[in-house]
Amino acid sequence: MTAPPASSLPSPALLPAIAQRRSLRAFDSTPVAESVLVRLLEAARWAPSSRNLQPWHFVVVPREDAAVHASLAAALTGRNPLWAPAAPLMIVALARLRDEQDRPIRMAAYDLGQAVAQLAIQAVAEGLMVHQMGGFDAAAVRVAIGAPEGLEPMTVIAVGRPGDPAGLPPELRALEAAPRTRRPLESFVSRGRYAG
Ligand SMILES: Cc1cc2nc3c(=O)[nH]c(=O)nc-3n(C[C@H](O)[C@H](O)[C@H](O)COP(=O)(O)O)c2cc1C
């Protein structure tokens, strides 16, 4: 097998929803239809998980839910508050870290990530974009959405249709056009035994 180079374009042989997924920042404000939102959550629901524990919870916060939305937006950090609140909805993805016997769920973050990956791919297939964020104040997110103990906010996910980059602050506009980069396969794949 010939390893693809560290190019800025995914192979055209990939599923279109994988190749086309991007974490851009320009969102259109058009609301996401409830039926579409349910399909995104269904895509997450049918993700595999260790022991089928499904250790996740999603809190959906549309812009119309103005008070919670404002608190959640205020909990974002870095440059995230400059673009994410313009998306028609944000979803807080939470991992359940302990099972019913109060034992740690070692794979919780892995399982949640996989569920979100499925949600993201479904979103692209629906003509939507999702942009996950780890840049937030977890304590403030907890307060904003009323998350109970034992559920850990892992990402806040902006969801909506791709929008016009002209509406972004200038420092973010350039990022939208930046080339995508990935490490080449041979830098992270070994055969037989580990070779770093
Ligand atoms: C767990 C996680 C946390 C991330 N946090 C942020 C963030 O806080 N702000 C941001 O702009 N992008 C964030 N991203 C998006 C990544 O920067 C992006 O996925 C990466 O640069 C690859 O770009 P692509 O998704 O367009 O392929 C995050 C992505 C993941 C998976």
Image (spheres, rainbow, N blue to C red):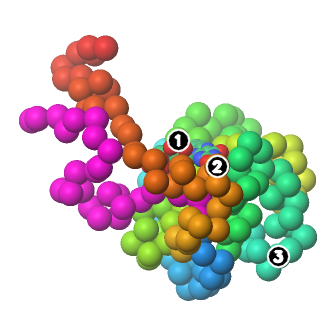
| Relative height, residue 127 to residue 156 (above, below) | below
| Relative height, residue 177 to residue 61 (above, below) | above
- Seen at 64% across and 49% down, the residue is 171
**Residue 59 location (% of width, % of height):** 72, 64
**Residue 114 location (% of width, % of height):** 48, 50
CA distance separating discs 2 and 3: 29 Å
Q: Amino acid at mark 2?
A: Glu
Residue that numbered label 3 is attached to: 65
Tell me where residue 19 sits by quadrant: bottom left
- Seen at 58% across and 56% down, the residue is 173
- Seen at 28% across and 40% down, the residue is 7
SS of the residue under disc 1: helix
Residue that numbered label 1 is attached to: 110
Q: Amino acid at mark 3?
A: Asp
Which numbered disc, 1 or 2, marks the residue that appears first in the sequence? 1
Q: Amino acid at mark 1?
A: Tyr
**Which one is closest to the eye, mark 2 or mark 3?**
2
| Relative height, residue 136 to residue 116 (above, below) | above
Residue that numbered label 2 is attached to: 171
12 in the magenta segment: yes
| Relative height, residue 189 to residue 193 (above, below) | below
**Which one is closest to the eye, mark 1 or mark 2?**
2
On the rendered image, what quadrant is the N terminus found in?
top left
In the rendered view, does 31 fall on the left or right side of 125? right
Q: Which residues are magenta?
A: 1-26
**Residue 181 vs residue 53, the one in the foreground:** 181
**Residue 35 location (% of width, % of height):** 56, 85
Tell me where residue 124 sits by quadrant: bottom left
Instruction: Specify the farthest residue to the left.
Output: 1
SS of the residue under disc 2: helix
Main secondary structure type of the part rendered in magenta: loop
